[in-house]
């Protein structure tokens, strides 16, 4: 006698239990369903002496057998991205239970990954993320931010505006000036006659004003 049991969503063929002649070999096929939602995972039960070929089992009917076909739902991971970048790919497609999948995050030029959320929980900034042992549907989201650069300003005399180290967005408009020139010093005085710069700042210039210029890298 042969008994066929279904675990999960699917069917088997032949579709009924039955009596079979001794020593004959019965071929049973497992068919998952509904389509694109479930897949055949494994055979279990009295499988000693059986042969397996994918979703088929070849069972010698030399004893009473109870065979079970197990079906599992596919899993899926959906990726989304905020402005100024991409998640690649944006959909894992159908994954079998326990599978893994790798996502990459690609910012637009002059932007970077600011944060990544897996199932709504932040994991910080990273360029790649790999899911392992996927057993349920999941989500991943990446946010991006514009690159920022420092501008260091110093002057031995007078008062620079702004002063010290400031930070600005990539390609932001910057302007620097020196006030308090001339600066009295005993019987003489200090006069601002020009400036030098590096990075996005013009290399040299005259007067008390520098700019406007676009901040595209760390500058002094």
Image (cartoon, rainbow, N blue to C red):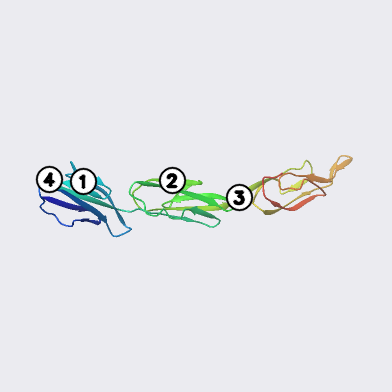
Mark 1 against mark 2, which lies toward the viewer? Answer: 1
- Tell which circle, 3 or 1, labels the residue nearer the N-terminal end: 1
Mark 4 against mark 1, which lies toward the viewer? Answer: 4
Label 1: few (<14), some (14–19) or many (≥20) C-alpha neighbours in 10 Å: few
- Tell which circle, 3 or 2, labels the residue nearer the N-terminal end: 2
Q: CA distance from mark 1 to mark 2?
A: 31 Å
**Mark 2 lies on residue:** 130
In the rendered structure, the answer to whether residue 63 lies left or right of residue 211 reads: left
**Mark 3 lies on residue:** 147
**Mark 1 lies on residue:** 44
Label 2: few (<14), some (14–19) or many (≥20) C-alpha neighbours in 10 Å: few
Q: Looking at the image, how many numbered discs can be counted on the residues? A: 4
- Tell which circle, 4 or 1, labels the residue nearer the N-terminal end: 4
Label 4: few (<14), some (14–19) or many (≥20) C-alpha neighbours in 10 Å: few
- Tell which circle, 4 or 3, labels the residue nearer the N-terminal end: 4
Q: Position of residue 114 (x, y in %)?
A: 53, 50
Image quadrant in which you'd find residue 12: bottom left
């Amino acid at each position: 006698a042969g008994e066929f049991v279904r675990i999960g969503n699917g069917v088997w063929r032949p579709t009924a239990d039955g009596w079979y002649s001794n020593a004959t070999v019965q071929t049973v096929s497992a068919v998952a369903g509904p389509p694109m939602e479930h897949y055949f995972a494994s055979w279990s039960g009295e499988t000693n002496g059986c042969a397996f070929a994918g979703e088929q089992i070849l069972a010698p009917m030399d004893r009473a057998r109870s065979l079970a076909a197990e079906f599992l739902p596919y899993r899926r991971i959906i990726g989304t991205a905020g402005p100024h970048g991409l998640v690649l790919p944006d959909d894992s497609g159908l994954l079998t239970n326990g599978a893994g999948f790798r996502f990459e995050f690609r910012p637009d030029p002059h932007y970077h990954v600011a944060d990544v959320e897996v199932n709504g929980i932040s994991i910080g900034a990273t360029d790649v993320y790999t899911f392992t042992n996927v057993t349920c549907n999941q989500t991943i989201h990446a946010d991006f931010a514009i690159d920022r650069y420092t501008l260091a300003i110093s002057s031995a005399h007078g008062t620079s505006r702004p002063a010290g180290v400031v930070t600005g967005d990539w390609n932001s408009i910057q302007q620097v000036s020196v006030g308090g020139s001339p600066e009295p010093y005993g019987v003489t005085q200090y006069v601002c006659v020009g400036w030098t710069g590096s990075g996005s700042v013009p290399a040299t210039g005259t007067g008390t004003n520098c700019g406007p210029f676009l901040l595209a890298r760390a500058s002094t």
